[in-house]
Amino acid sequence: MALIDQQQALEFLRDGAVVALPTETVYGLAGRIDQDQALERIFKTKQRPFFDPLIVHVKDLQQAEAWAQFDEASRHLATSFWPGPLTMVLPKKDGISRLINNGGTTVALRSPDHLVFQQLLEQLKVPLAAPSANMFGKTSPTTAQHVLQEFAGNVPVVDGGACHRGIESTVVQVDLNNQVLRILRPGVIDADQLRDFFANQNIKLKVIEAQSEQAPGHLKNHYQPNQPVALVDSLQPLDQQGLQRLTEKTSGPWQELLVDANPTVAARHLYGHFREFSDLNKPLWIRVQPHWKTEPAWQGFYDRIQKAASYRLVYENGHWRVLSET
């Protein structure tokens, strides 16, 4: 079982199987939300803990409103950002399986911006749960080949090309009572974009970052490649002593990942770089730039490398010191 076409994917999904599908962010391991057997297969295939919520992928706002309660602000967000890399956590309606949200009162929804996924949603008439198509905690796939490699060809996958976003969606939750929009997971759509959107809509909501267990990818260690990643959190040039500190943790040769100056491009290629260097058995070090910590456009990228990192290398009092990130 390996690459399949769109018609085969439709038949698999109708029968309650799981299929890896392309989105604009990463490839997702999809199963229909009205069949618990399909949802259970997602968790078992990924070895994902059942407490970690799934994102429900819908065709559009109309389909989403059958499964969640929208307020004015969240409806405006869907109208403007869907289809696209924005997930909203909303009060659920009856009919949502507890496997999707661990029996909670909310559900996370988004509409993917990929023709293959959209066409399958139109044909099925049922939303699909689709977490990233990789083993739990590991690097998300951005090509069909990544999925085949991850599951040794045991998961059928539709090849929709390389994902043009490259990291997972931004996850938000609107709190109209407190006039706040919480970013539960940073992503491609950043805080500045959301602030500008609400200002243009004349909606008074303060945009803040507040990670939550209601959002996928909230665990401290996630997105990790098969070789270690170290964050060099200093502008001090990395000398032989610093490399020796890293080699004491994991034998090299350690390789620097050169990050593009454009955050969109950097995010698009991040997971591909992780997999490429893991295939070469080379651990990576990444020089942390100060503006990654402060500029909203970099928050999605910085979130992913922090959670992927096994070590952080800092320079103190003339010496390099390795801190464990796991």
Image (cartoon, rainbow, N blue to C red):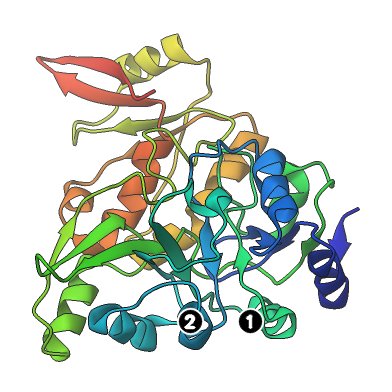
Q: Amino acid at mark 1?
A: Gln
Reading the chain from its start, which is encountered first: label 1 or label 2? 2
Q: Position of residue 21 (x, y in %)?
A: 69, 65
Q: Is residue 154 left or right of residue 167?
A: right
- Distance, label 1 to label 2, CA atoms, is 9 Å
Q: Identify the residue under disc 1.
A: 118
Q: Position of residue 153 (x, y in %)?
A: 84, 47
Q: Quadrant of residue 93?
A: bottom left
Q: Which mark is residue 83?
A: 2
247 or 75, nearer to the observer: 75
Q: Secondary structure at mark 2?
A: loop
Q: Tell me whether the residue at label 1 lies in contact with that at label 2, contact meaning CB atoms closer than 8 angstroms.
A: yes
Q: Amino acid at mark 2?
A: Pro
Q: Residue at the spot x=11%, y=84% of the render?
A: 199
Residue 76 drawn above or below residue 261: below
Q: Label 1: how many residues lie within 10 Å, few (<14), some (14-19) or many (20+)?
A: some
